[in-house]
Structure formats: structure tokens, C-alpha cells
Image (cartoon, helix red, strand yellow):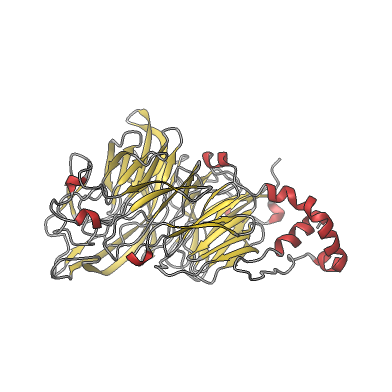
Amino acid sequence: MNLQTYFRNHAMNQLRTVEGRTQGMPPRAGSGFASKLGGLGLLLAIFLAPCALTPQLAAQGLAPETLLQPPTSSWPTYNGEYSGRRFSTLDQINSQNIGSLTLAWRFRANVTIKSTPLEVNGILYLTTPDNVWAVDGRTGRTIWHYHRPSAGDHIGHRGVGMFGDWLYFTTPDAHLVSLNARDGKVRWIIELADAKLGYFSTMAPLVVRDHVIVGVSGDVTDIPGFLESIDQKTGAVQWKWYTEPRPGEPGSETWPKNSDAILHGGAMTWMTGTYDPELNLLYWGTGNPNPVLAGDVRPGDNLYSCSIVALNPDTGKLAWYFQPSPHDVHDWDAVETPTIFDAEFGGAPRKLLAQASRNGFFFVLDRATGEHLVTAPFIDINWASGIDSRGRPIIKPGYAPRPDGALVEPASDGATNWLAPSFDPQTGLFYVSARRVFSIFYLTTTGKPEGWAGRDAGLWANSTIRAIDYRTGKVVWNHELGDGESGAGILTTAGHLLFTADVDSNLMALDPATGKTLWHVSVGDSTENSPMTYELDGRQYVVMAVHDELFAFALPESTVRPRH
């Protein structure tokens, strides 16, 4: 270990946890040289650390142009980059050498990890509700830890957004926190919504230029959903777009007149959207309308609930919308990733958007105009009688919730959920973690329904990976994951690999062309996040969470040849 490396490690290990607690980390494994230096090392560090650390710290920030590029060596935003494809161009780990994959390091958070870490300049940024960690991407050692206890729903957390030297973190009490990425210190904290009304936030913000795009969660009470753009420097609100139109605005006619239903309609913005820099459009999915499961008090399509919307990031103005589940009565959010890619369709190049939605249908749209192109079921469903002229499924009579129960497939958890899909440009296939799940939907309220007006009782479920031809919506291959509901998302790479996990505590790599298992390892617990990958010092890492731990895998160092 050279002096510069030692001084860098020494300084990083002395960074303090925000809230005033010392995080003093032990020396790196194999750094006996540090203890031999003793007091002399500390004196040298005091005098020489500025020149040793300045280049490293100066490089820590995220260059804005990185967000516009496909993920190569880094993973700078929730989905890797703006498209939501979760496809990495890294290929050091590939279908030929996957059998040599080994554990490089592991990190324990002591609370279930549902987030996807970011990786920028060798540092991983990881979240759980109330917590952000900066972790060394080579060793898994903690650099700093930010902890902010809060009230609100602690259902899970998806991750941070980043721009320059700043991180953006949403909280269970519906606040947005801006942290310094170098040391975890707070720059500012703002309130997004009043947690006492039932709002909270779990999503990873999406940063577009000086806009930090954030959404909210909450459907226990009848509150309106919205997206908000926050100035990344000051925390000031730039614009707010409500998921229900105001009375008299376009779309308000899809709610009942002479009623306040539109003002309490839910449609939360739970998850991170995508962005097309060329069209300058955001794409976002919205949640179910309120009251949940009870549709009689809100007749109509209930726009813009259960919709995919395109918004101008500079103004928040709606460009177009598509509604996968009009007048939803099954809690089938349409918040699943609106994945964007350019590809051939109908013999011509098109700008496409694809979503595997919670209701069990796969949709393909023209993302410039919102034109519907494909609607097809990607899993077994029993509730739809066909497709209407706008490409939307039509519910069969008798499949809405009722007091004596209605047997429906899928359940309210959906045929998929927040689990990240992937699109692989090498195969031209769209991949989704899907479920066959039956449930009986009941209406349980009397009088005016509010919040959750019913429940569904799950009967049976199993999980599968489905590979879908985006041109037709047909399933090309199917890989069974076992009985139960999988919580793992998907990553594809240029190494001809698809990473995910099954319901039996196995992390897996599949052949994305066929679905054949190429590698698996039993880790003893469940996975509820989505994989990511990055490269440091010429070595590729693949990271997945298992319960409350991050596992980082790589090829043995002796087999890795640095890139030149």
C-alpha cells in the first residue's frame, strides 16, 4: 500500500456519522503498514493529506453529463440512467466465465434493503427508511452514515438521487433531504406534504438538470397525489402537478359531478420515472384511485389514476397520458417503470415506451405522442373480456369487489409490482418479474367508503421471469422461480447475462436469450431489491441485497485484467 492510499483511507475512516456520532472505522484488511507508522503516520497525514485527498474528493461529484449516457463503469441514478432499461454495457462478467463469480464483500444495514444503491466514483450510496450510507465500492466499508428518525410509514425505501456533490433523499414523514455526498452533512430539509394527513415518501428522486423530481405515497386516507419539481440548489418548489385534475380542467369530466371525490382521489407517485432528453419529456406511472376497491362512489375513468403520463420537466405541463387501468377497483397501480428505448416497430424506427403493468397486461406506446401500439397479457388473468379501441383492457361483469367476494387473478399485489424490469437491446426482449396470484376481493365498508373500503384475501401465488417480444407482446420464454411472490428485480448486461433471484433464497444469472440458468448461489434469505453493477479499477462488481445485507460479487482478482 502506498502512502497516498494510506492517507486517503485514514481520512475516510475518520469521517463522522451525521448526528454527531463517531464512525471510526478499523484499518483496511491488510493495512498493517498503517499501524506501524503510528504517530508518525498521523503527523504525515496532517501535513500531506490535503494534497493526497484533493484529487479524490474533487472527483467524487456526479458530472451532469453522466446521467445522459448508458451506464458503463458507474450507476448514477435509480435505474442506472434515464431510460429505465437497467441494461449495463459492462461485459467483464459474462456467460463464459460466470461460473467463476465469487463474493467480493458484504455490507449489513440491520434493516431490510429494498433500495438500489447508486455508485459514483467508487462510492455506493445506499438507503433504508431514515438512513443513508456511503460505502466503499471496493471493500464494503462504511464511509459515513446519515440517520434521521421520523414518523410515518416505513414500508421501504428505493434510493437517492444525485447531482454534483449533492444527494437527495425522501423520508417516511414526507420530507426531502439534501446531503453533501462527501460527508453526509445536511444542506437543507423541506416538507413535501403533511405526514399527519397520511402522506409519506419512499421513492428515489429523479434529477433532470436543476430539477429534482419527487413524488409521494399514501392511500390509507383519501388524499390527492402529486409530482413536484424542486430546485436542486435551494429546495424551492418549481412546479407541482396533481394526479387528479382540478375541477373544470381536462380530465375532470372522468370524475363524478357534484361530488368532492376528485379532491380526495389518491393516485400516488410511488416510484421513480424515466426521462427522454431529446424530447424533453418525463414519463411517470401513477397509483390507484381512492377510496381503494370501492368504485361506485367515483364513477368514470378517474384520470389520471393508474396512468402513464408524459410531462415537461421545466413546467410540469401534461403532454399526453395513457391509462392501463381505467376506473381501477383492484389496487392495480400503474407505477411500474415506464421503460423507454428506440427500436424498430412495424418496419420503421420508433421512439417507444413499454410497461408491464400490475394488472397483468404489457403495453407499448409511442413515447413522443402517447399513441397506443401493443396491449397483451404477460401472465394468466381472469378478469378482462377484451381490449377497447384505445388499447385498454375491459373488465368482465362480476369481477369487481363485492361483500360476498370475487375471485380474481391477479391479487392486489399485482401480476408484477415495483420490481424493476429490464430491456436488453442485444436480444430485443423486455423482461419482467411476474406472479400468478389469486385472491378474493371483498367490499367491507357500509355507508360512505373512505381509504381502504375493502380487502383481498390471497389464496396462492407463484413467480416467474417472463421474456416478452415488445413488437407483439408475446412471451418468448418463461423461467419459473417457485411458489410465493418474488421480490427481486432484474438487471441485464452486455455479458449476455440476466441477474435476478428466486423465491428459494437463490441469487441467479440466466441466459437472456433462453432463460437457462447459468449460475446460482444460495444466500439463505429473501431478496427485495433490484441488482446493479459497476466497474472499479478494471474490476466489475454485481450487487444485490439479501434481506438486510448487500452482497457484491466479482471475478477473482487473479483472473481480472485491467482495461487499458
Would you identify the image quadrant in which residue 156 lies? bottom left
Q: Is residue 365 above or below residue 549?
A: above
Tell me what residue is drawn at x 27 percent, y 51 percent: 305
Q: Is residue 472 above or below residue 129?
A: above
Tell me what residue is drawn at x 53 percent, y 65 percent: 131
Residue 7: image location, x then y, percent? 78, 58
Residue 11: image location, x then y, percent? 74, 60
Would you identify the image quadrant in which residue 216 lies? bottom left
Would you identify the image quadrant in which residue 104 lies? bottom right
Which image quarter holds the C terminus?
A: top right
Farthest residue to the top: give it.
348
Residue 236: image location, x then y, percent? 46, 49
Which image quarter holds the N terminus?
A: bottom right
Left or right, residue 207 beside residue 554: left
Work out whether residue 458 or residue 125 is closer to the camera in this orientation and state it: 125
Farthest residue to the right: give it.
40
Residue 11 visible in image: yes
Q: How many marks?
A: 0
Residue 253: image location, x then y, percent? 17, 45
Tell me what residue is drawn at x 52 percent, y 39 percent: 68
Residue 511 visible in image: no
Work out whether residue 257 or residue 291 is closer to the camera in this orientation and state it: 257
